[in-house]
Image (cartoon, rainbow, N blue to C red):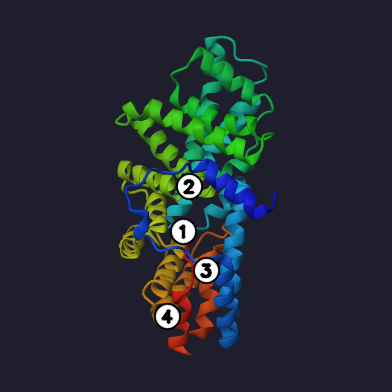
Amino acid sequence: MPKKKKSQELQRRMNPPLQSSVDTEDIEPEMDEETLQKMKEKMLREHPEFKKVFQHLEKSGKDRTEQAQNSSVVFTNKRGTVTEELLMQYPNSPTAKQTMIALNHYQFAFCVLWSYTKPRVLVQSDCDSIQPGLHHYMEGYMIAMYMSQQFPLPPTIETLVEDYLRLRPNDSLVEYFHVTIVVDMQTKKKSDYESCKDIIRAHEIFVHKIFPFKNVDTEKRILIDSYYLLGAKYTSTDQDVRALDAFEKCYALDETNIGALYSVAFHYMTKDPEKALKLCNKYLDMAPKCDEKYPNVHYVMGFIYATHMKNIELAKKYYYLGQKAETLRLPFNPPTDFSIKYFLESLIPLAGTKRRQLENALEHIDLD
């Protein structure tokens, strides 16, 4: 099956059609691809300086197609190794302090889990031995999921976790371990669509189960993290409506959660640009400048100013603020790989020249 059709089929299957009360006669028909292509070619003949802008838009579209075909791409860890020595160089960084807490959890969990030499968990005393490792692993995971790749799990972990839950089925942290880690391991051999479906379904069932306990501290923290991961998985499978709903539920449970705040703003970027800008400004008021998403927020704001408000000067301003923010993050974070950043990068050299033509070109950009 061609890549484009495969992507469209995946999106169709993951997003069943919704019933609508809108009169379809009032909806303007979309232009077909051939007409849009001719418009683009005409524009490039008249304004060849816009070539890079369109190249980056095409790359963004290809990236979304690849993501729809292989949703695990978005979860790949591209960061460097996190060490105590590195984090201690940034004693005033809130991000470094939180990362150090996560690192300590992982290190303790790693020692406990690899010290457990039995092939099974068969009695309550076995549960007592392994529980601290499973609990600390998930405490670290909920702070810095990406760091889990530094701490590989024992090859028997699937059996150990399933044995444990048969003896202690109400241990929510270990059940969350099963939902986030074991289910993911078990779906590796399946197609991406089947894997996504199984992982999302497992999270949805789990969220439904623990929601009644949302006022209990541990369950609340797990629920917040579960909604965030669901939002990320919905995003990676191009289910934007469900993603926004999950991120909003996450943020409603914890209004100090700057990751959820950023994600909500991102999903309002084209739906409600003014609301997105307000949320971005709220994020900038709350988040430390060393936060991983600090540059992204500036790029999102630049994109909104460029495409929705046609204010190229403000787009330029926020692009450079994003560039500066990248230098303030912790060094194990890679340069921001963000299609909106590259779009702005291609747009900025055109700022101040042929302004009217540039604004006209932006009118024809398909933001979806």
Q: Nearer the viewer, mark 4 or mark 3?
A: 4
The amino acid type, in three-letter code, at marker 1 is Lys
* Label 4 to label 2: alpha-carbon separation: 30 Å
Q: Nearer the viewer, mark 2 or mark 3?
A: 2
- Within-10-Å neighbours for mark 3: few <14, some 14–19, many 20+: many
Mark 2 element type: loop
Residue that numbered label 3 is attached to = 341
Q: Residue at x 44, y 43 (%)?
A: 228
* Label 4 to label 3: alpha-carbon separation: 14 Å
Residue 81 in view: no
Image coords of residue 298 (percent x, y): 43, 67
Q: Residue at x 66, y 38 (%)?
A: 191
Residue that numbered label 2 is attached to = 239
Residue that numbered label 4 is attached to = 312
21 left or right, relative to 146: left
Q: Nearer the viewer, mark 4 or mark 2?
A: 2
* Label 2 to label 3: alpha-carbon separation: 22 Å
Name which quarter of the figure residue 206 lies in: top left
Mark 3 element type: helix
The amino acid type, in three-letter code, at marker 4 is Ile
